[in-house]
Image (spheres, helix red, strand yellow):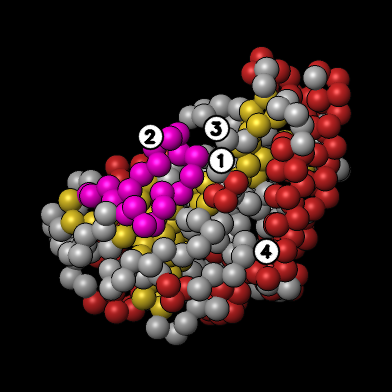
Protein backbone atom coordinates (compact mmCIF):
# COMPACT_ATOMS: atom_id res chain seq x y z
CA UNK A 1 0.00 0.00 0.00
CA UNK A 2 1.19 3.50 -0.83
CA UNK A 3 -0.35 6.26 1.26
CA UNK A 4 -1.12 9.50 -0.55
CA UNK A 5 -0.57 12.99 0.80
CA UNK A 6 -3.92 13.97 2.33
CA UNK A 7 -4.54 17.74 2.38
CA UNK A 8 -8.02 17.42 3.88
CA UNK A 9 -9.12 20.20 6.22
CA UNK A 10 -10.70 17.63 8.55
CA UNK A 11 -11.03 14.83 9.28
CA UNK A 12 -7.39 15.27 8.49
CA UNK A 13 -4.28 13.22 7.87
CA UNK A 14 -2.77 11.28 10.78
CA UNK A 15 0.81 10.00 11.10
CA UNK A 16 1.30 6.52 9.65
CA UNK A 17 3.12 5.39 12.80
CA UNK A 18 0.11 6.34 14.94
CA UNK A 19 -2.29 4.55 12.63
CA UNK A 20 -0.10 1.42 12.60
CA UNK A 21 0.08 1.35 16.39
CA UNK A 22 -3.68 1.71 16.60
CA UNK A 23 -4.03 -1.06 14.01
CA UNK A 24 -1.73 -3.36 16.01
CA UNK A 25 -3.63 -2.70 19.24
CA UNK A 26 -7.12 -2.76 17.77
CA UNK A 27 -7.86 -6.44 18.33
CA UNK A 28 -6.23 -6.71 21.74
CA UNK A 29 -4.84 -3.85 23.81
CA UNK A 30 -1.59 -4.65 25.63
CA UNK A 31 -2.45 -8.22 26.57
CA UNK A 32 -5.77 -7.30 28.18
CA UNK A 33 -7.70 -9.89 26.17
CA UNK A 34 -9.95 -7.27 24.61
CA UNK A 35 -9.79 -4.25 22.37
CA UNK A 36 -9.52 -0.77 23.89
CA UNK A 37 -12.85 -0.12 22.11
CA UNK A 38 -14.49 -2.83 24.22
CA UNK A 39 -13.18 -1.77 27.61
CA UNK A 40 -15.21 0.08 30.21
CA UNK A 41 -14.36 3.75 30.39
CA UNK A 42 -14.38 3.36 34.17
CA UNK A 43 -12.05 0.37 34.17
CA UNK A 44 -8.48 0.69 35.38
CA UNK A 45 -7.04 0.14 31.91
CA UNK A 46 -8.87 2.96 30.19
CA UNK A 47 -8.63 5.29 33.18
CA UNK A 48 -4.85 4.95 32.89
CA UNK A 49 -5.00 5.72 29.16
CA UNK A 50 -7.12 8.82 29.83
CA UNK A 51 -4.88 10.07 32.63
CA UNK A 52 -1.76 9.65 30.49
CA UNK A 53 -3.39 11.47 27.58
CA UNK A 54 -4.20 14.43 29.81
CA UNK A 55 -0.70 14.48 31.28
CA UNK A 56 0.85 14.39 27.80
CA UNK A 57 -1.40 17.15 26.50
CA UNK A 58 -0.56 19.31 29.51
CA UNK A 59 3.13 18.78 28.77
CA UNK A 60 2.73 19.41 25.05
CA UNK A 61 0.83 22.70 25.49
CA UNK A 62 2.35 23.70 28.85
CA UNK A 63 -1.11 23.85 30.43
CA UNK A 64 -0.94 25.38 33.95
CA UNK A 65 -2.45 23.57 36.92
CA UNK A 66 -5.10 26.24 37.35
CA UNK A 67 -6.68 25.16 34.06
CA UNK A 68 -8.97 22.16 33.76
CA UNK A 69 -8.56 19.91 30.72
CA UNK A 70 -11.78 18.41 29.41
CA UNK A 71 -12.17 15.70 26.77
CA UNK A 72 -15.71 16.01 25.45
CA UNK A 73 -17.86 14.34 22.81
CA UNK A 74 -18.79 16.10 19.61
CA UNK A 75 -17.13 18.99 17.83
CA UNK A 76 -16.24 22.62 18.33
CA UNK A 77 -19.70 23.77 17.19
CA UNK A 78 -21.19 22.14 20.28
CA UNK A 79 -18.78 24.10 22.47
CA UNK A 80 -19.87 27.31 20.77
CA UNK A 81 -23.29 26.77 22.35
CA UNK A 82 -21.97 25.50 25.70
CA UNK A 83 -19.62 28.45 26.26
CA UNK A 84 -22.37 31.07 26.72
CA UNK A 85 -24.42 28.62 28.81
CA UNK A 86 -21.50 28.16 31.19
CA UNK A 87 -19.85 31.58 31.20
CA UNK A 88 -22.69 34.09 30.87
CA UNK A 89 -25.96 34.85 32.55
CA UNK A 90 -29.10 34.85 30.39
CA UNK A 91 -29.07 37.83 28.07
CA UNK A 92 -25.66 39.06 29.20
CA UNK A 93 -23.52 40.68 26.53
CA UNK A 94 -20.70 38.70 24.91
CA UNK A 95 -18.28 40.21 22.41
CA UNK A 96 -17.46 38.38 19.18
CA UNK A 97 -14.74 39.28 16.70
CA UNK A 98 -15.32 37.83 13.23
CA UNK A 99 -12.53 36.90 10.85
CA UNK A 100 -14.26 34.18 8.84
CA UNK A 101 -16.91 31.50 8.44
CA UNK A 102 -16.40 29.79 11.78
CA UNK A 103 -16.63 33.03 13.73
CA UNK A 104 -20.05 33.54 12.17
CA UNK A 105 -20.99 29.98 13.13
CA UNK A 106 -19.97 30.70 16.72
CA UNK A 107 -22.28 33.72 16.73
CA UNK A 108 -25.15 31.61 15.42
CA UNK A 109 -24.70 29.03 18.18
CA UNK A 110 -24.40 31.64 20.94
CA UNK A 111 -27.23 33.94 19.87
CA UNK A 112 -30.05 32.10 21.69
CA UNK A 113 -28.26 32.51 25.03
CA UNK A 114 -26.46 35.87 25.11
CA UNK A 115 -26.65 39.38 23.76
CA UNK A 116 -24.12 38.93 20.97
CA UNK A 117 -22.17 42.08 20.22
CA UNK A 118 -20.03 42.09 17.08
CA UNK A 119 -17.03 43.97 18.41
CA UNK A 120 -15.27 43.85 15.05
CA UNK A 121 -15.56 42.07 11.71
CA UNK A 122 -13.58 41.80 8.49
CA UNK A 123 -16.57 40.50 6.52
CA UNK A 124 -16.94 43.74 4.55
CA UNK A 125 -13.56 43.09 2.93
CA UNK A 126 -14.23 39.39 2.31
CA UNK A 127 -12.56 38.04 5.46
CA UNK A 128 -9.09 38.65 4.07
CA UNK A 129 -7.59 39.90 7.33
CA UNK A 130 -7.88 39.83 11.10
CA UNK A 131 -9.77 42.90 12.34
CA UNK A 132 -7.11 45.23 13.85
CA UNK A 133 -7.44 45.06 17.67
CA UNK A 134 -7.16 48.86 17.85
CA UNK A 135 -10.54 49.02 16.06
CA UNK A 136 -12.36 46.57 18.31
CA UNK A 137 -15.38 47.97 20.13
CA UNK A 138 -15.20 45.90 23.30
CA UNK A 139 -17.79 45.99 26.08
CA UNK A 140 -16.57 46.46 29.64
CA UNK A 141 -19.47 44.35 30.94
CA UNK A 142 -19.08 41.47 28.48
CA UNK A 143 -19.02 37.93 29.86
CA UNK A 144 -16.17 37.11 27.48
CA UNK A 145 -14.58 37.97 24.14
CA UNK A 146 -14.62 35.27 21.47
CA UNK A 147 -12.23 34.88 18.53
CA UNK A 148 -11.44 32.14 16.03
CA UNK A 149 -7.67 31.74 16.20
CA UNK A 150 -7.45 30.24 12.72
CA UNK A 151 -10.18 30.30 10.11
CA UNK A 152 -10.05 26.95 8.31
CA UNK A 153 -12.07 28.09 5.29
CA UNK A 154 -10.86 31.63 4.71
CA UNK A 155 -7.24 30.91 5.69
CA UNK A 156 -6.88 33.77 8.19
CA UNK A 157 -4.86 33.35 11.39
CA UNK A 158 -4.08 35.51 14.39
CA UNK A 159 -0.32 35.96 14.69
CA UNK A 160 -0.51 37.77 18.06
CA UNK A 161 -2.79 37.36 21.07
CA UNK A 162 -5.19 40.30 21.46
CA UNK A 163 -5.42 41.97 24.88
CA UNK A 164 -8.97 41.95 26.25
CA UNK A 165 -8.12 43.25 29.71
CA UNK A 166 -10.13 41.80 32.58
CA UNK A 167 -12.66 40.17 30.25
CA UNK A 168 -11.65 36.54 29.54
CA UNK A 169 -10.62 35.71 25.99
CA UNK A 170 -12.26 32.60 24.53
CA UNK A 171 -10.73 31.11 21.39
CA UNK A 172 -11.58 28.40 18.89
CA UNK A 173 -8.23 26.73 18.16
CA UNK A 174 -9.66 23.77 16.26
CA UNK A 175 -7.40 24.15 13.23
CA UNK A 176 -4.21 25.51 14.79
CA UNK A 177 -3.81 24.02 18.28
CA UNK A 178 -0.39 22.46 18.93
CA UNK A 179 0.96 23.86 15.66
CA UNK A 180 3.18 26.40 17.44
CA UNK A 181 3.83 27.60 21.01
CA UNK A 182 0.71 28.74 22.83
CA UNK A 183 0.57 30.91 25.95
CA UNK A 184 -2.46 29.31 27.57
CA UNK A 185 -2.57 31.93 30.35
CA UNK A 186 -3.58 34.60 27.83
CA UNK A 187 -6.94 32.85 27.43
CA UNK A 188 -9.87 32.05 29.66
CA UNK A 189 -11.03 29.18 27.47
CA UNK A 190 -9.41 27.38 24.56
CA UNK A 191 -11.41 24.78 22.69
CA UNK A 192 -10.47 22.63 19.72
CA UNK A 193 -12.01 19.82 17.73
CA UNK A 194 -9.42 17.04 17.63
CA UNK A 195 -9.78 16.09 13.97
CA UNK A 196 -7.14 18.41 12.54
CA UNK A 197 -4.05 18.46 14.75
CA UNK A 198 -4.92 16.30 17.75
CA UNK A 199 -6.50 13.08 16.51
CA UNK A 200 -9.78 11.78 15.07
CA UNK A 201 -13.17 13.39 14.64
CA UNK A 202 -15.69 13.07 17.49
CA UNK A 203 -13.57 14.45 20.33
CA UNK A 204 -13.10 18.04 21.48
CA UNK A 205 -10.53 19.33 23.94
CA UNK A 206 -11.44 22.24 26.22
CA UNK A 207 -8.92 24.09 28.38
CA UNK A 208 -10.70 26.30 30.89
CA UNK A 209 -9.35 28.45 33.68
CA UNK A 210 -10.69 26.98 36.90
CA UNK A 211 -12.04 30.24 38.28
CA UNK A 212 -14.38 30.44 35.29
CA UNK A 213 -15.90 27.13 36.35
CA UNK A 214 -17.26 28.98 39.39
CA UNK A 215 -19.56 31.11 37.25
CA UNK A 216 -23.18 30.12 37.68
CA UNK A 217 -23.98 30.56 34.01
CA UNK A 218 -27.48 29.68 32.87
CA UNK A 219 -29.95 26.92 33.61
CA UNK A 220 -28.66 23.84 31.84
CA UNK A 221 -28.70 20.07 32.09
CA UNK A 222 -25.84 18.47 33.98
CA UNK A 223 -24.40 17.05 30.77
CA UNK A 224 -23.94 20.62 29.46
CA UNK A 225 -22.18 21.83 32.63
CA UNK A 226 -18.39 22.20 32.41
CA UNK A 227 -18.19 21.97 36.22
CA UNK A 228 -19.72 18.50 36.20
CA UNK A 229 -17.34 17.26 33.51
CA UNK A 230 -14.33 18.71 35.33
CA UNK A 231 -15.39 17.18 38.65
CA UNK A 232 -15.62 13.73 37.03
CA UNK A 233 -12.47 13.86 34.90
CA UNK A 234 -14.55 13.99 31.70
CA UNK A 235 -16.26 10.72 32.68
CA UNK A 236 -19.70 12.18 33.40
CA UNK A 237 -21.06 10.00 30.62
CA UNK A 238 -19.47 7.38 28.38
CA UNK A 239 -16.85 9.28 26.37
CA UNK A 240 -15.67 8.37 22.85
CA UNK A 241 -12.98 6.07 24.21
CA UNK A 242 -11.38 5.08 20.90
CA UNK A 243 -11.05 8.72 19.88
CA UNK A 244 -9.55 9.61 23.26
CA UNK A 245 -7.08 6.73 23.03
CA UNK A 246 -6.07 7.71 19.49
CA UNK A 247 -5.64 11.36 20.54
CA UNK A 248 -3.36 10.09 23.31
CA UNK A 249 -1.21 8.34 20.68
CA UNK A 250 -1.05 11.63 18.77
CA UNK A 251 0.12 13.54 21.86
CA UNK A 252 2.92 11.02 22.41
CA UNK A 253 3.91 11.21 18.76
CA UNK A 254 4.11 15.00 18.88
CA UNK A 255 6.18 14.90 22.06
CA UNK A 256 8.50 12.28 20.58
CA UNK A 257 8.95 14.45 17.48
CA UNK A 258 10.13 17.33 19.66
CA UNK A 259 6.95 19.17 20.65
CA UNK A 260 5.33 22.33 19.39
CA UNK A 261 8.61 24.18 18.79
CA UNK A 262 9.60 21.58 16.20
CA UNK A 263 6.18 21.63 14.56
CA UNK A 264 6.18 25.42 14.45
CA UNK A 265 9.42 25.32 12.45
CA UNK A 266 8.12 22.60 10.12
CA UNK A 267 4.81 24.37 9.61
CA UNK A 268 6.57 27.61 8.74
CA UNK A 269 8.61 25.74 6.11
CA UNK A 270 5.56 24.03 4.62
CA UNK A 271 3.52 27.22 4.46
CA UNK A 272 6.47 29.13 3.02
CA UNK A 273 6.82 26.61 0.22
CA UNK A 274 3.16 26.79 -0.81
CA UNK A 275 2.79 30.55 -0.46
CA UNK A 276 6.06 30.94 -2.36
CA UNK A 277 4.68 28.88 -5.23
CA UNK A 278 1.54 31.02 -5.30
CA UNK A 279 3.31 34.37 -5.08
CA UNK A 280 5.88 33.55 -7.79
CA UNK A 281 3.35 32.12 -10.25
CA UNK A 282 2.87 35.41 -12.06
CA UNK A 283 -0.82 35.46 -11.23
CA UNK A 284 -1.59 31.92 -12.37
CA UNK A 285 -2.35 31.18 -8.69
CA UNK A 286 -3.46 33.75 -6.14
CA UNK A 287 -4.13 33.89 -2.40
CA UNK A 288 -6.34 36.77 -1.31
CA UNK A 289 -5.43 36.96 2.39
CA UNK A 290 -3.38 39.89 3.67
CA UNK A 291 0.14 38.42 4.04
CA UNK A 292 0.43 39.30 7.74
CA UNK A 293 -2.72 37.27 8.48
CA UNK A 294 -2.04 34.26 6.27
CA UNK A 295 -2.73 30.92 7.92
CA UNK A 296 0.05 28.37 8.18
CA UNK A 297 -2.50 25.60 8.54
CA UNK A 298 -5.01 26.23 5.76
CA UNK A 299 -4.03 27.84 2.46
CA UNK A 300 -6.93 28.67 0.13
CA UNK A 301 -5.95 29.77 -3.35
CA UNK A 302 -7.51 30.30 -6.74
CA UNK A 303 -6.49 29.86 -10.36
CA UNK A 304 -6.69 32.84 -12.69
CA UNK A 305 -8.75 30.61 -14.98
CA UNK A 306 -11.38 29.19 -12.64
CA UNK A 307 -12.42 26.63 -15.24
CA UNK A 308 -9.13 24.82 -14.58
CA UNK A 309 -9.80 24.26 -10.88
CA UNK A 310 -11.73 21.01 -11.29
CA UNK A 311 -8.94 19.70 -13.54
CA UNK A 312 -6.34 20.76 -10.97
CA UNK A 313 -8.12 18.79 -8.22
CA UNK A 314 -8.61 15.72 -10.42
CA UNK A 315 -5.03 15.63 -11.69
CA UNK A 316 -3.68 16.21 -8.19
CA UNK A 317 -5.71 13.29 -6.87
CA UNK A 318 -4.44 11.06 -9.67
CA UNK A 319 -0.93 12.07 -8.62
CA UNK A 320 -1.46 11.13 -4.96
CA UNK A 321 -2.41 14.58 -3.62
CA UNK A 322 -5.84 14.27 -1.99
CA UNK A 323 -8.63 16.61 -0.84
CA UNK A 324 -7.47 19.85 -2.45
CA UNK A 325 -10.91 21.11 -3.45
CA UNK A 326 -11.79 24.37 -1.72
CA UNK A 327 -14.70 24.68 0.69
CA UNK A 328 -18.05 25.25 -0.97
CA UNK A 329 -18.39 28.60 0.80
CA UNK A 330 -15.46 30.10 -1.12
CA UNK A 331 -14.53 27.63 -3.88
CA UNK A 332 -11.07 27.42 -5.36
CA UNK A 333 -8.36 25.17 -3.97
CA UNK A 334 -7.34 24.60 -0.35
CA UNK A 335 -4.27 22.89 1.07
CA UNK A 336 -4.33 22.04 4.77
CA UNK A 337 -0.88 21.59 6.29
CA UNK A 338 -1.51 20.22 9.76
CA UNK A 339 1.19 18.75 11.98
CA UNK A 340 0.93 15.27 10.48
CA UNK A 341 1.57 16.57 6.96
CA UNK A 342 5.32 16.14 6.33
CA UNK A 343 7.43 18.74 4.56
CA UNK A 344 7.68 16.25 1.68
CA UNK A 345 3.93 16.62 1.17
CA UNK A 346 4.23 20.38 0.71
CA UNK A 347 7.16 19.83 -1.64
CA UNK A 348 5.10 17.37 -3.70
CA UNK A 349 2.23 19.87 -3.93
CA UNK A 350 4.55 22.68 -5.03
CA UNK A 351 6.09 20.45 -7.70
CA UNK A 352 2.64 19.56 -8.99
CA UNK A 353 1.62 23.24 -9.02
CA UNK A 354 4.65 24.11 -11.14
CA UNK A 355 3.98 21.25 -13.53
CA UNK A 356 0.30 22.10 -13.83
CA UNK A 357 1.11 25.73 -14.58
CA UNK A 358 3.63 24.72 -17.21
CA UNK A 359 1.05 22.54 -18.95
CA UNK A 360 -1.95 24.87 -18.63
CA UNK A 361 -0.52 28.34 -18.16
In the rendered image, which quarter is residue 138 located in? bottom left
Secondary element type, mark 4: helix
Secondary element type, mark 1: loop
Q: In terms of sequence position, does the residue under pointer 4 or pointer 2 come before the other?
A: 2
Q: How many marks?
A: 4
Q: Which of marks 4 and 1 is in front?
A: 1
Q: In terms of sequence position, does the residue under pointer 2 or pointer 3 come before the other?
A: 2
Q: Residue under circle 2? A: 124
Q: Residue under circle 3? A: 327
Tell me the CA gap for discs 1 and 2: 14 Å
Q: Quadrant of the N terminus?
A: top right
Query: Looking at the image, is 150 positioned above or below residue 124?
Result: below
Q: Residue under circle 4? A: 264
* Residue located at (29% from left, 42% from top): 108
- The residue most toward the left is 91
Tell me the CA gap for discs 3 and 4: 25 Å
Residue 190 in the image, given as x and y percentages of width and height: 43, 65
* Residue located at (18% from left, 56% from top): 93
Q: Residues within 10 Å of mark 3 (few under 14, many from 20)?
A: some
In the rendered image, which quarter is residue 20 located in? bottom right
Q: Which of 51 and 118 is in front in this view?
A: 118
Q: Nearer the viewer, mark 4 or mark 2?
A: 2
Tell me the CA gap for discs 4 and 2: 31 Å
Q: In this view, does 37 lie to the left or right of 171?
A: right
Find out whether the residues at labels 3 and 4 contact each other: C-beta distance under 8 Å.
Answer: no
Q: In this view, does 181 lie to the left or right of 348?
A: left
Residue 289: which numbered mark, if any? Answer: 1
User: What range of the chain is rendered magenta?
Assistant: 116-136
Tell me the CA gap for discs 2 and 3: 20 Å
Is residue 69 among the parts visible in the rendering? no
Amino acid sequence: MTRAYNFSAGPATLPESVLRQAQAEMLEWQGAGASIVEMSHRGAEFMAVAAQAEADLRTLLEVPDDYAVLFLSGGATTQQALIPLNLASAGQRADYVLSGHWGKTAVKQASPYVDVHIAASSEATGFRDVPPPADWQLSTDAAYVHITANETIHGVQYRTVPDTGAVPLVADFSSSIASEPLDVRRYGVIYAGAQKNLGPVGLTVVLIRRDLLERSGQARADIFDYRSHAARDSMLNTPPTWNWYLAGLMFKWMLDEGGVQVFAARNAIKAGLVYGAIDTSGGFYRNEVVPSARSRMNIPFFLADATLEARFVAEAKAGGLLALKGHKAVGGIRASLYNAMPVAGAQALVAFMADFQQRHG
